[in-house]
Each structure stands twice: as C-alpha cells, then as structure tokens.
Amino acid sequence: MAKSENNKKVPGALIVVVVVIIAIAAFVPTVYMPYKNKKPTMDAEHQEALDTIAYYDQSIENQDVIEADIAKLTEEWERYRKDMFVEPESTLEDLNNNLVANEIEVRSFEQSDAIEDESGTVTAEGNPLYYVTIKIDCLAEREQLIKFLKYVEEESVGAYYVRSLDASPEYVYDSDSEIVGEPLSASMEIYLYYFNQNIVVQPETEETDTEAAM
C-alpha cells in the first residue's frame, strides 16, 4: 500500500519545469514586451543624456581657457585705460628716466602748460584731448639717440608725437686736436597727448544748437 502512494507523487523536476514555464509566460507580456516596445525611446533618451554629459564635461574643460581669456582681456583693457588716462607729470618723469638710462646729456628740458587740442576730440565719457609741448636739447651718441626715439614712439605709455628733430655732429677733440668722438647735438620738439580725466565736456543738445543759431 505504501509503495502505491509513492508512485503517485509528482516528480520535483516536473514542478520546476512548470514553474519556469509559468514565470516565462508571465514575464513575456508583462516585462519583456513593454521593455521591447520602449527600448528605442529609452535608447534615444540615454544617448541624449550622454550627449548632455559630454557637453558639460567639455564646458568644464573649457572653463579654464575661458577664464584665462577673460583675465587677459581684463588686463589689456586696464592697460589701455591707463594709457588713455596717463598723468603728464609721471609720464614726463618716465621720459627723463629714459634719457638718463641711455646716458644722454640733457642740456635743456622745457615743457609747456597743458593745452586743449583744437580738434575737440573727447572720449565716450566726454574727457577732452590735451597735449603738452616738450623741447629737449641734448648731446648723445647716434645709437643712444635712436634708442631714446624708439622708446618715445613705441614703448612709452605716453602717446608721444615727435614734431621736429635737428641733429648735427659735434666733434670732440683731444689735447692734440685730434677728433676722438662725434656725438650728435640734437634739438627736438615732442608733443605728449593725453585725455584729461579731470574734465568732462557735456555734449551740446539739439535744442542748445537751435537756440545758438537763433
């Protein structure tokens, strides 16, 4: 009798197979098919996310370059601003220092009072253009004089204009009346232009112009 009951038991392997079949049958319509249908959209969203991440990664990498460019432009602007609003006193002192540095013997150094330029040129803020006339008489070797003029025209922070230059050799003799040197005796007139930041010219309005015409 006991042997007959054992024969009626369902094999465990069969139960496992049935469970797997039921699981697959439930998985396909409830999980796999919805996933398969949504996969193209999910892939597109995933790629979009990757592109966004790559964009921000690139932006972060470029941030240092952008900040460096901004710092460079800020430095250039500050230099241009200082060049535009030079102080005549400090600029003329710089000019004197360069004469000394080039070992140029200054015989006379004269400067006029500041004069407003007749062109009426002003900055966007209304600061008028001024200039100072500088007259220098000196004795210098040719190379020294060239270095000084190059500094004036290309390197100084001041906006200089060499209006005139006259130079001729001045012979240096020894005790035997032999020429031992030919430095140049030079006379030059230089204009220093600058915008006067202490003065603001108010632009005339159309109404004022009309009243003036009447």
Image (spheres, helix red, strand yellow):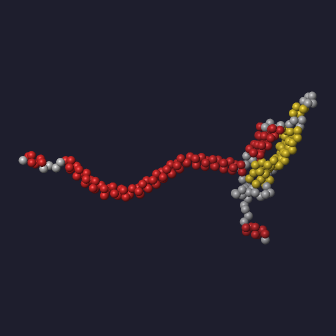
The image quarter containing residue 139 is top right
Q: Which residue is most to the top?
A: 176
Where in the figure is residue 153, as x and y percent of width and height? 77, 46
Q: Can residue 103 be seen in this view?
A: yes
Residue 38 drawn at (x, y percent):
38, 57
Q: Is residue 142 above or below residue 159?
A: above
Q: Which residue lies furthest to the left in this view?
A: 1
Query: The C terminus appears in which quarter of the rendering?
Result: bottom right
Q: Residue at x 48, y 51 (%)?
A: 53
Is 13 situated left or right of 108 in this image? left
Name the foreground residue: 38 vs 154. 38
Q: Which residue is drawn at 46% across and 51% down?
A: 50
Q: Which residue in the rendered view is the most extreme toward the bottom?
A: 214
Above or below 107: residue 28: below
Q: Disc count in the image? A: 0
Q: Is residue 4 left or right of residue 186?
A: left
What's the residue at 77%, 43% (across, down)?
A: 150
Q: Position of residue 94 (x, y in %)?
A: 75, 42
